[in-house]
Amino acid sequence: MHLNFLAFAIPLFLFFIAWEYLYSKRSGKNFFQYAESVANINVGIAERLLDLFTTGLFFYFFNYVYENFALFDIKASLLVWVLLFLVTDLIWYWYHRFAHEINAFWAAHVVHHQSEDFNYTVSARITVFQAVIRSLFWAILPLLGFPPLMISILLLVHGIYPFFIHTQALGKWGWFEKILVTPTHHGIHHASNPEYLDKNYGDVLIIWDKLFGTFVEEDKNIKITYGLTKPLESHSFLWQHFHFMLEIMLNFYYAKGFKQKWRTLFGKPDDLDPRYRAILERKFLRYRRTKETPTKAMRYYVSIQTGISLLVLFIVLLFVDYFSATSLALFSMFILVSLINCGAILDQRRWISYLEIARICLLLFICYYYYPSNYTATIFVSAIMIAIVYFSDIQRFYTRVLYSRSKT
């Protein structure tokens, strides 16, 4: 049996989250918020899922550049491994810095900074858009002549190490603070305090920030506020991914002249007109903006949905070689609809009934796909008919059970 053992990164990831959560509870520091944690994990689920379809493409892209455009023929050796590590880390620094300073790149990276928490769940807030942009930067490596296999191995380091610095549980690392990016350094990077904005971009080594003037140490007199300078105030899966892209589009549409349109795409986030953000929020987030703790029913139901999504993702990743393209597409659709639904529930949207019905129909269709028969076909068609006839009752039932404490 051929298994994809990278799937076991999921239970390992959950183990460290559980350890950090227990630590935060016992120490009384409380750096977990339920809705934030779920939203963070759901973004990570989507990224892991879409990696199934993109990772091979990235390797093919590196290999194509290497075989057709490599400037040098670099052979593996200890010195080359050290050099490659330094070069990958330097490229990361500039990718990360540009991701904060250029709107087109910030549109992909902003998702990582939306959480108002700072814990291991935040490390999951990576999107496939961000992975694509990173790969364009790392294309410099095969162009220089570094073998794609070496690059892929080093990029695993850049995928694993950052996870461990998204925490408040490990404190300062003593002497290592001088050369490595530590949780203290990276916590500052996630801060929205004016003193800490656009600082500490490094991935593994902090030396690049010190060299290029973007390093700052933590000031114990400043209480760190995590997240964006203008909080997102939404846990919608779709809004988290696309709100800044929509802002750019609206700014670009109303920009006058080539120079202004260019600044919309390649200028800094501060160059955008904030009025368009408000317009988009009124259009897509028409609900009460005050924060509320999720009801017990919401917590149970969203937790179950998230758990099912994680389980399905784990099974798909572990046995990916045994799934057909159609099966992968169906399970991917089920997971994505579930993630969108979780965000809609946390935002207490009234249209979750549509997503619930879509999920159930999709699940029944998957059953029919694997066990085609008149029996499963009848159940599938009957479910659709029931959903159509009793939609209003279904909608009232879901909203009453989940949002009973909410004011309407």
Image (spheres, rainbow, N blue to C red):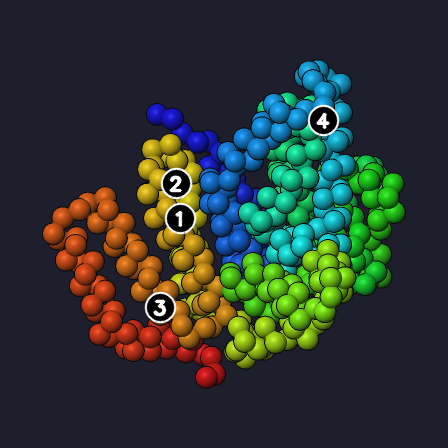
Q: Are marks 2 and 1 in contact (CB under 8 Å)?
A: yes
Report the residue that reaches farthest toward the left. Answer: 374
Kindly identify the residue that appears in the image at 68 percent across and 75 percent down.
Answer: 275
Question: Which amino acid lies under the numbered mark 2 shown in the image of this protein?
Answer: Val
What percent of the width, then of the height, locates residue 374?
11, 52
**Element class at badge 3:** helix
Question: Which amino acid lies under the numbered mark 4 shown in the image of this protein?
Answer: Leu
**On the image, numbered disc 2 is attached to which residue?**
316
| Distance CA(mark 3)–CA(mark 2) | 26 Å
Question: Which amino acid lies under the numbered mark 3 shown in the image of this protein?
Answer: Tyr
Kindly identify the residue that appears in the image at 17 percent across and 63 percent down.
Answer: 382
**Element class at badge 1:** helix
In terms of sequence position, does the residue under pointer 4 or pointer 2 come before the other? 4
**On the image, numbered disc 1 is attached to which residue?**
332
Vertical placement of residue 242 versus 390, above or below = above
Q: Nearer the viewer, mark 4 or mark 2?
A: 4
